[in-house]
Image: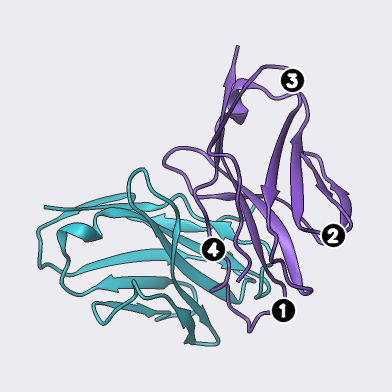
Chain colours: A purple, B cyan
Amino acid sequence: LAKTTQPISMDSYEGQEVNITCSHNNIATNDYITWYQQFPSQGPRFIIQGYKTKVTNEVASLFIPADRKSSTLSLPRVSLSDTAVYYCLVGDMNYGGSQGNLIFGKGTKLSVKP
Amino acid sequence: EPEVTQTPSHQVTQMGQEVILRCVPISNHLYFYWYRQILGQKVEFLVSFYNNEISEKSEIFDDQFSVERPDGSNFTLKIRSTKLEDSAMYFCASSVQGGTGELFFGEGSRLTVL
């Protein structure tokens, strides 16, 4: 299983762009990179998923270099409501029909200040 | 937007009592999961369920735990004899595909064991 490492916490101010980097040196060929967001006392919420290069949706962008040993979640112009824990997960899209290898780490606690 | 619903939102029980947590996954989803999160700690995988059987389970999911899909819509987690350390937020999730496809989480059921 590919282990992920991400900063424990980050601080930002409203309106800034926030980039959270995740290291996954042992990522396997079939692994995808997925980011979730979790607010206090709520379930995690899917943000974005990618395999390589760049993926963008209405919420965020995900940058993955060619070696795929890291990835960066980019949140444009954050607001106070983006204060949450962000999790980077790595796992095989085709793994046995289960999510057993989708392991949540401690995540990055992002605090957005006014 | 379809969502995963969980009941109860909060349950208080005495140690040794049986508890059943209920979940209604999104209707066209085929894969179902339970995760738990002890206060202040990371989200932990418990079990995945597909085609009416357990696909994978973690070390946490011992003989005290069981899951069931009794009627084609509900997905339940039963804890036979609760312990103090079972106090946690329990999240149900579902997905269309297995592997690391997008998981949709419910709001959680907070279990407090006294």
Do marks 2 and 3 both belong to one polypeptide chain? yes
Q: Are marks 2 and 4 on the same chain?
A: yes
Mark 1 highlights which residue?
A: A94
Q: Residues within 10 Å of mark 3 (few under 14, many from 20)?
A: few
Query: Alpha-carbon distance for marks 1 and 3?
Result: 36 Å
Of mark 2 and mark 3, the one earlier in the sequence is 3
Relative image position of residue B15 (x, y in whole percent): 10, 62
Amino acid type at circle 2 is Asp
Which residue is under mark 4? A103
Cβ–Cβ below 8 Å for labels 2 and 3?
A: no
Please, what secondary structure does the residue beneath circle 1 have?
Answer: loop
Q: Residue at x 62, y 30 (%)?
A: A82
Residue drawn at (68%, 58%), measured in percent from left and top?
A: A24
Give residue A67's mark.
Answer: 2
Q: Marks 3 and 4, how far apart in space?
A: 29 Å
Whether labels 4 and 1 share one chain: yes
Q: Which residue is mark 3?
A: A16
